[in-house]
Image: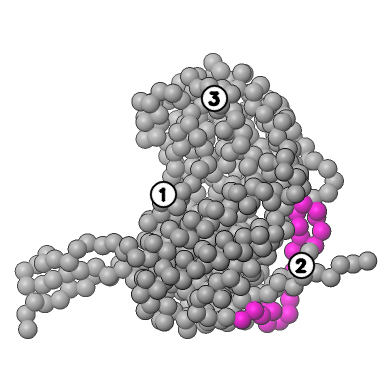
Amino acid sequence: MSTELRRLRNYIGGEFRDAADGRTTEVVNPATGEAYATAPLSGAADVDAAMAAAAEAFPGWRDTTPAERQRALLKIADAFEERAEELIAAEVENTGKPAGLTRSEEIPPMVDQIRFFAGAARMLEGKGAGEYMEGLTSFVRREPVGVCAQVAPWNYPMMMAVWKFAPAIAAGNTVVLKPSDTTPASTVLIAEILGSILPKGVFNVVCGDRETGRLMVEHPTPAMASITGSVRAGMAVAESASKDLKRVHLELGGKAPVVVFEDVDIAKAVAGISEAGYFNAGQDCTAATRVLVHESVHDEFVQALAKAASDIKTGMPDDEDVLYGPLNNPNQLKQVEGFIERLPAHARVEAGGKRVGDQGYFYAPTVVSGLKQGDEIIQKEVFGPVITVQSFTDEDQAVEYANGVEYALASSVWTRDHARAMRMSKKLDFGCVWINTHIPLVAEMPHGGFKKSGYGKDLSAYGFDDYTRIKHVMTSLED
């Protein structure tokens, strides 16, 4: 017997709607490999409708006071707490993640981030008014940019939706958000929550595929396009947005170096790095998956890391003993398998290196050593539970290897030498440098990279500023 699939719908102008032409796509639970819902495959008419709704709502939302926007966001944060179990269920179905970890590691940060941006709404910064030219007073206005077209990824669909809408709405913008075509369920639920609090049209959700995203970015209405995704997708967005000079906010791929010096406590370093590398199946742009170890402790480290990998479990969402769930989709599983299949002869698989089970898209915690700087698996983002290990001889070579990739999002340094840690934090060309830890994020600090990891910041006051524009106002002091 076939089970009837749940129907997800777009949220446009305060109403849930099917795609105008009725097209849908099946949504698959990656833990089972089975479809559980359908979602709209939105086209030009749906994008037009969402942009029109956002544009119509913008003047009214722009003109609300910061205090009013703060109150709305605080209500949203409270609603997220009240409906946490619904959000967790939707996200688990979206992604196959462990339910317990989603409850403890995603809901509290999301709520905190919404509340942070609620406060940021009332902390607009700019130069003080003054007479910079005789007889004239100047001051700066911070204003929302307008309608924002936003595209969220499938690795953290619920949290990345928060990173998108919270600063944009706090600053007085209106939003059209597209979730990934593989993970729309939690975003549609978020639309229901926000729709009960915000004026209609302030927040809109359009489900669809890459073509839907392309239509959003190319649409003449948005003043800004924001995407979290692959380098390829980010470059396409930047190129498309350049045609009408839209503002662009890009958080793209990563290949985080994890630099381990000889003075560390190996056991503690391995424990922290393995958790930060395998969490969320390594499907994280900041994941600790490219380890550089001083040659004097390389073999000991590899042995300990391989043992840690063998002790880590992947499995179904309701298993409390698992660290991570499945890869998100069959294409991602194929990509991870391809990296391992193409390993050069000098590489050694120390642990894992294989699919787990025949249901869903699970892959074993994997460690690969014996690699060289130019190897594909060192240079390209795997986005899976695969940690690579290289050795280095000294600090200069560590910096050379760490910076020798096209990505520049996050990094970490593991050492007991404070001066060395400070030197490395200066030399590492990445948007974040952790010292003796890897992957924690806080709402008050910026997250974003350099080079092909994109530009623009998420979280923090810097992330809030990205959703504002600056206007100089000058007035004569004469009658």
The residue where tag 2 is placed is 37
Q: Does the magenta stretch include residue 31?
A: yes
Which comes before the other along the chain, label 3 or label 1? 3
* Residue 272, image x, y percentages: 57, 33
Answer few, some or many: residues within 10 Å of disc 3's Cα (few below 14, many 20 plus, some between 14 and 19).
many
Q: Residue at x 31, y 64 (%)?
A: 124
Boundaries of the magenta span: 15-35
Q: Nearer the viewer, mark 3 or mark 1?
A: 1
Nearer to us in this view, 20 or 477: 477
Check disc 3 and report its element: helix, strand or loop.
strand
In primary-sequence order, the first of circles 3 and 2 is 2
Residue 306: image location, x then y, percent:
68, 27
Can residue 340 be spotted in the picture?
Answer: no
Residue type pointed to by label 1: Met
What distance separates the C-alpha of mark 3 from that of mark 1? Answer: 28 Å
Residue that badge 3 annotates: 293
Q: In this view, does 141 lie to the left or right of 217?
A: left
Furthest-front residue in view?
82
Question: The disc labelled 3 sits on which kind of residue?
Answer: Val
